[in-house]
Amino acid sequence: MFSVRKFEERDVPDCAMCFYESFFDCPLTENDRAFLRDYAQVLAEKCSFTYVAESEGQVVGFIIGHYKKDFDKALAKQHDVKPHYKAWFRCFFKFAFGGYKMSAPFKAQFDLFYKKLKENGKDTPLACDCELMALCSRRDYRKGLGTALWEAFQERCIQSGVKTVRVFTDTDATYTFYEKRGFKLVWEKPYSFGVPGKSLVYEYQIETS
């Protein structure tokens, strides 16, 4: 069983490890961990809302929602937690100028992750009410964790009047999770930088009674 609640700042270290386990598999140095913590904080706080799932007192997954301006400008500016603009700027500045001194294996994996992330920002259909991103630990994968997070996310969208949710993913990720829950593939494009695979966009139409 997983309990789902709103993200709190104390959850950052656990969220950082969920982010790591979702995309990376190389050993980590302390510098790598410092970057992951800062990046996870930006990720979790900069969007409109974030929920975490706990198991035995530990955060094992989180899900992020970002309202689009065309849907509701006020909600798009909303943060469930206090924005930490200085921390966000410091993270981006430090990353841009190599201040984290990440290990070579981790930097190589993160650079590939970042290239794929940027692919999702090019020529993709962005017209939706809310964007979704979910990250989970390997230990709790396929044990109902994703479902618990998605149900909390969906309930939040219903409360906000959201009709259309879109998620950006790729053929290396668990896109079948979304297919099994009624998401429809609405866009796909092969990577432009010579790596096998595709960027994918899935859409979910929320039915309200």
Image: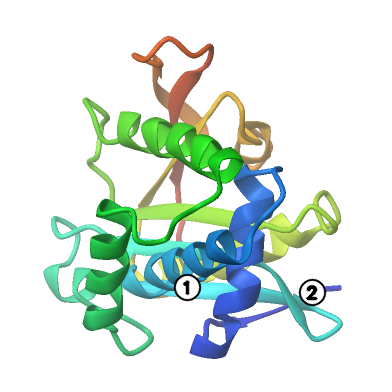
Q: Which residue is mark 2?
A: 2
Is residue 23 visible to the viewer in this orientation of the structure?
Answer: yes
Please name the amino acid that badge 1 sits on. Thr
Q: Whole-percent x and y of residue 32?
A: 55, 59
Q: Which mark is residue 95?
A: none
Task: Give the mark nearest the N terminus, 1 or 2.
Answer: 2
Q: Spatial distance from mark 1 to mark 2, Cα to Cα?
A: 16 Å
Q: Secondary structure at mark 1?
A: strand
- Indicate the secondary structure of the residue bearing disc 2: loop
- How packed is label 2: few (under 14 Cα within 10 Å), some, or many (20 or more)? many
Q: Which residue is mark 1?
A: 50
Is residue 80 toward the left or the right of residue 134 in the image? left
Up-down relation of residue 103 to residue 19 (above or below): above
In the displayed structure, 85 sits above or below 140; it is: below
> Between 154 and 43, which is closer to the camera in this rendering?
43
Q: How is the rendered protein coloured?
A: rainbow
Residue at the (13%, 55%) spot, across then down: 70
Nearer to us in this view, 153 or 27: 27
Task: Identify the residue shown where x is 22% and y is 57%.
Answer: 68
Q: What type is the residue that disc 2 sits on?
A: Phe
Give the left or right position of residue 24, taking residue 115 as reference.
right
Q: Residue at x 43, y 25 (%)?
A: 199
Specify whether residue 209 is in view. no
Would residue 12 be found to the left or right of residue 39 on screen? right
User: Picture quarter containing residue 193?
Assistant: top left
**Please, is residue 187 above or below residue 153 in the view?**
above
